[in-house]
Image (spheres, helix red, strand yellow):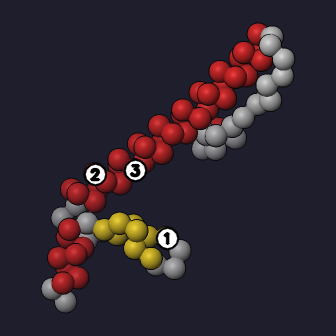
Amino acid sequence: AMRVGALRQKVAVAGSSEIATLATAFNAMSEELAQSHEALQQSNQTILLRRSSIGVWIGRCGYRVIQHNIALARDASSD
């Protein structure tokens, strides 16, 4: 599952053996990896929006604008 991008994976932790310690460490690593990946994606979107000289918008289903850059606002106001 992680191989295809589902980074938040959990394994069962039972007892206090070395395997349980490993499972706990895996769960923490999985969560940290997912959070880092999400932050990196957000950062990339922000950079793309700020640096683009053409209008760009990021939306969700139903064409609702979530983010847009200055160029899009400028283009929309000149219509």
* Viewer-side residue, 6 vs 13: 13
Q: Any mark on residue 47, and which? A: 2
Tell me the residue at 20%/68% (across/down).
70
Within-10-Å neighbours for mark 3: few <14, some 14–19, many 20+: few
Report which quarter residue 68 is drawn in.
bottom left
Tell me the residue at 53%/74% (across/down).
61
**Mark 1 or mark 3, earlier in chain:** 3
Left or right for 26, reference 36: right
User: Which residue is situated farthest in the top direction here?
Assistant: 18
Q: Any mark on residue 60, and which? A: 1
User: Which residue is situated farthest in the bottom direction here?
Assistant: 79
- Spatial CA span between label 1 and label 2: 19 Å
Q: Amino acid at mark 1?
A: Arg
Quarter of the picture containing the N terminus is top right
- Spatial CA span between label 1 and label 3: 15 Å
Q: Residue 51: x percent and y percent?
A: 21, 56
Q: Which residue is mark 3?
A: 42
Report which quarter residue 74 is drawn in.
bottom left
Q: Secondary structure at mark 3?
A: helix
Q: Is residue 3 visible?
A: no
Report which quarter residue 5 is drawn in.
top right
Vertical side of 66 occupied by 8: above or below: above
Left or right for 59, reference 45: right
Q: Amino acid at mark 3?
A: Gln
Tell me the residue at 65%/21% (across/down).
25
